[in-house]
Image (cartoon, rainbow, N blue to C red):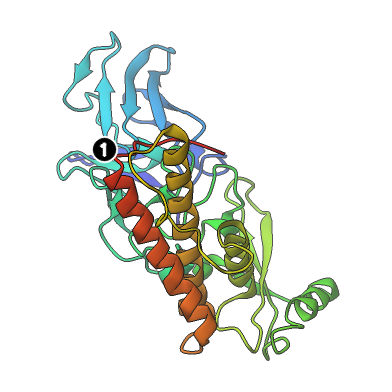
Amino acid sequence: GIHLIASIDSVSEAQFTASFFGSTKALHGEVAIPSAETTTHNHSNQQYSITAVTTSAGAIAERYAYSAYGEPTILDPSGTVIASSSINNRYSYTGREWDATVGLYHFRARWMSPKSGRFLARDPIGFMGSAWDLYEMLATGPLVRIDPLGYRSGRPGDTPSKTIPDMLRQAIPCPVEIETRATNSCADYGGVKAGYPKCFKTPDPAKPGTYIKSFDVFCNDLDCEFSIFQWIKDRKAAYCKVDGVSTSCVDIDCPCDRKTCGKIWNNIRDNRGCWKAREAEANLCFIGRENAGHKQAREDAKRAFETCEDKKKECKCSYVFTP
């Protein structure tokens, strides 16, 4: 299963984690770990990263700080930086296990390098984990997201169905309201594909004995699940211009003031978002069936993104945030 049962060191001393079951941090590692000698408690922040370990008496045993993608800094009780954990604690960034020997994190399905901020292996569930990148870590949101299993990221507090892969879902009959919702969703896309919708229940690790319900819908004219298609449509609505024409940086002259640099950065964001959304739509939802107009709009957005990147370098624009 996905729960840790025991941790055995080099002399075979089992550290049983009975309190792990039913813990709200069951996927992330914040638990009391009793051993033959003492009991320690892990303390985490809002992202489940372990920030301190205390003894059963409440005294600080170690503290931890992290770079954006989890390179750890370990401090002793006095606040002095030390080279490695003196208590052999391996739970750290987002509650995952740190291997100091190789400098990598174990995210169950894959290993992650905090130096590069990327996984070392392709996502086992393909583009279901990320629509952009099979090696992407935490959807480029390392300060706010988690990925307890190494399949797909989510935010702390997300239901397990968003971060747990399909293999843990159990099929259940679909209620009438889900059938109706599927029919309405696929009305403009050839109707609901035979055998769908499919409904599931997923064990909720935070509440043993309870389940999170979810469902999948496929339409006859789509190659991707409808919720993915809807997510891509939302991305297009956010980043692509209504008329489909990408925002260009060709007419911007250097040198640039702060306002113009802000415009360049915004154009980079919008053009890249539009290009990647259209690319995902073509590669996931209309495989081999991209029409000429969509292909042209996708290529225009990519070209505009590259032009704005070049203009940013030419004008030597540092990052400027503009809403």
Q: From the viewer's perspective, tell me whether residue 58 is left or right of residue 291.
A: left
Q: Residue at x 53, y 79 (%)?
A: 294
| Label 1: few (<14), some (14–19) or many (≥20) C-alpha neighbours in 10 Å | few
* Depth check, front residue: 129 or 239: 239
Q: Residue at x 52, y 37 (%)?
A: 322
Q: Quadrant of residue 306?
A: bottom left
Q: Position of residue 312 (x, y in %)?
A: 33, 46
* Depth check, front residue: 275 or 219: 275
User: Which amino acid type corresponds to the residue marked 1 in the rendered image?
Assistant: Glu
Could one spot residue 277 in this view of the protein?
yes
* Depth check, front residue: 190 or 320: 320
Q: How many marks?
A: 1
Q: Residue at x 26, y 15 (%)?
A: 76
Q: From this view, report whether residue 208 is shown above or below residue 196.
A: above
Quarter of the image with the C terminus in it: top right
Quarter of the image with the N terminus in it: bottom left
Q: From this view, report whether residue 62 is shown above or below residue 202.
A: above
Q: Position of residue 164 (x, y in %)?
A: 51, 59
Could one spot residue 284 in this view of the protein?
no
Q: Residue furthest top?
A: 78
Q: Which residue is mark 1?
A: 13
Q: Position of residue 246 (x, y in %)?
A: 50, 63
Q: Position of residue 279 (x, y in %)?
A: 45, 72
Helix, strand or loop at disc 1? loop
